Structures are given as structure tokens and as C-alpha cells.
Image (cartoon, rainbow, N blue to C red):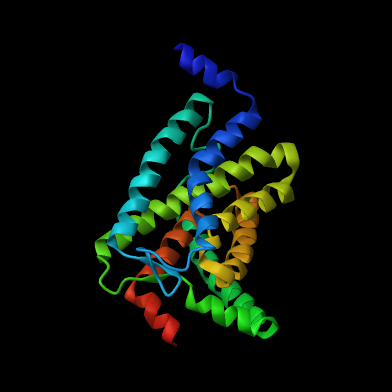
């Protein structure tokens, strides 16, 4: 064991938590908060983020680099894939399909209720909601969706809920996970808020109850693929 490994293993749980959460989501949260006041820019059109090839490549590079460091850090700390429940199974895939369906149902209901309660705000929010570049490379869409879906769920659900569940209770763990998930999605505006909160609660609850991470990852990857592809634009036009 090297002195560095020994130092990392001696860190208090609270420091470990800050390292992982800030390492995985600190920059996205900071960028997301800054975007709330941004009305224009190279990556914006009409106030909303445009997911083009350059943006997707940036996401992949950032998340791969951060994942390599954080996985190494957590392995030194004694974390394993089994500890976060990462195991690919047919049953988990089935739960993932149900979770995918549940996500869209919750999103539609939440957006409908929000539109009834705050029509002006939701209409304005629709104008700055992120869109995908029509010419985006589909191979890149699949790669970015896979990397992003796995990265987010490993850390925002698998790590945060596992780290907090025993010490703080299931609902505290789920709520913290949902808040973090919301913070790095603030760039999506009002529509993102009313969508991400129920999604975060649903994913957190399913994970806390089943201790299976694969269903969340499976559903998240498919949601990203649909959202970034022509299929997503077709569904929006329905």
C-alpha cells in the first residue's frame, strides 16, 4: 500500500462524499447554474442548449475522465460494483423497460399539471428547453447516451443513495440524490425542473427498494437516445 492509498483510506466518509459528488457533478452543477442567466452564446439558440457533435464529445470526454478517477478513488476506499448493485440481468432489463415507461408517464403528467398552473412560465420554458442538432452524428448519440446514462446513475443513484441510506435513512438518501440530479439539470429550465424531480424520486425509490442499478442505467440510456435523436423530435411533434 502506497502512502497515497493509505491517506485516501483514512479520509472520513464526509470527505469521501464531497470528493465523489463534487468530482462527478461539481462542474455540471456550476455550469447549469450559470446557464440560468445566459441568453445567448455559442452553444445556445433561442436561450436553449443545442446538443451538437462538439457538445456530445465534450460530455463523453469529461465523464470518461471523471469516471476513471472516481472509480479508482472509490476502489481504494473499498467500494465494489456489488456494493452499488451493478449487475446486468434479464429481470433488471425488464424493470428498466417499466421504468422507461413510468418516466414518460410521470413527465407528461407533471408537465400537464405545470402547464395548467403556470401556463406563461411553461410556455417561456419551452423556448429555452435543450434541443438536438438535426445533423448530429447518430453514432455519437449512442456513445454519448450510453456513457452519460451509466455515469449519472452510478454516481447520482448508486453512490449517493448507498452512501447515505444506512446513516441517514432511505428518504434522506433519495431526496439528496434527487436534489443533486436537479441541480445539474437546471439548464433545462422550468420543463426540466418539473420533469427531473419526479424522475429523480422514482429512480431513487426503485433503486433503494431493489438495490439494482442496471434498470436505472438501461432506462436512462434509452431516454437520452430518444431525446437526442430524430425519434425524440418526432415524439415532440405528436
In the rendered image, which quarter is residue 125 located in? Answer: bottom right
In the rendered image, which quarter is residue 231 located in? Answer: bottom left
Task: List x then y, in percent, for residue 110.
Answer: 63, 75
All told, the count of numbered labels is 0
Q: Nearer the viewer, residue 214 or 61?
A: 61
Residue drawn where x is 45% and y is 66% of the image = 223
Q: Quadrant of the N terminus?
A: top left
Rendered position, 168 above or below 119: above
Q: Nearer the viewer, residue 188 or 155?
A: 188
Q: Nearer the viewer, residue 146 or 11?
A: 11
Task: List x then y, in percent, for residue 138.
Answer: 26, 66
Task: List x then y, in percent, for residue 173.
Answer: 68, 47
Task: List x then y, in percent, for residue 176.
Answer: 66, 49
Look at the image and tell me whether residue 168 can be seen: yes
Left-right relation of 233 to 85: left
Residue drawn where x is 42% and y is 60% of the image = 221
Rendered position, 229 above or below 67: below
Left-right relation of 139 to 215: left
Look at the image and tell me whether residue 1 can be seen: no
Rendered position, 119 above or below 84: below
Q: Quadrant of the C terminus?
A: bottom left
Residue drawn where x is 48% and y is 72% of the image = 129
Amino acid at each position: 500500500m502506497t502512502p497515497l492509498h493509505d491517506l485516501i483510506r483514512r479520509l472520513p466518509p464526509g470527505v469521501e462524499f464531497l470528493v465523489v459528488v463534487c468530482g462527478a457533478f461539481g462542474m455540471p452543477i456550476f455550469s447549469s447554474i450559470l446557464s440560468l442567466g445566459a441568453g445567448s452564446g455559442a452553444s445556445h439558440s433561442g436561450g436553449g442548449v443545442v446538443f451538437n457533435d462538439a457538445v456530445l464529445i465534450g460530455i463523453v470526454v469529461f465523464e470518461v475522465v471523471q469516471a476513471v478517477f472516481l472509480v479508482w478513488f472509490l476502489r481504494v476506499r473499498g467500494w465494489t460494483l456489488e456494493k452499488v448493485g451493478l449487475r446486468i440481468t434479464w429481470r433488471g432489463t425488464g424493470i428498466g423497460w417499466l421504468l422507461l415507461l413510468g418516466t414518460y408517464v410521470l413527465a407528461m403528467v407533471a408537465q400537464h399539471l405545470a402547464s395548467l398552473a403556470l401556463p406563461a412560465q411553461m410556455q417561456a420554458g419551452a423556448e429555452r428547453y435543450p434541443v438536438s442538432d438535426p445533423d448530429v452524428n447518430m453514432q455519437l448519440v449512442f456513445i454519448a447516451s450510453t456513457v452519460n446514462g451509466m455515469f449519472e446513475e452510478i454516481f447520482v443513484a448508486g453512490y449517493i443513495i448507498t452512501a447515505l441510506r444506512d446513516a441517514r435513512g432511505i428518504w434522506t438518501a433519495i431526496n439528496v440524490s434527487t436534489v443533486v440530479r436537479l441541480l445539474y439539470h437546471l439548464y433545462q429550465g422550468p420543463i426540466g425542473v418539473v420533469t427531473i424531480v419526479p424522475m429523480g424520486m422514482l429512480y431513487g425509490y426503485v433503486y433503494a427498494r431493489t438495490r439494482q442499478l442496471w434498470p436505472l442505467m438501461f432506462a436512462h440510456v434509452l431516454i437520452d437516445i430518444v431525446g437526442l435523436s430524430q425519434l425524440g423530435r418526432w415524439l415532440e411533434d405528436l
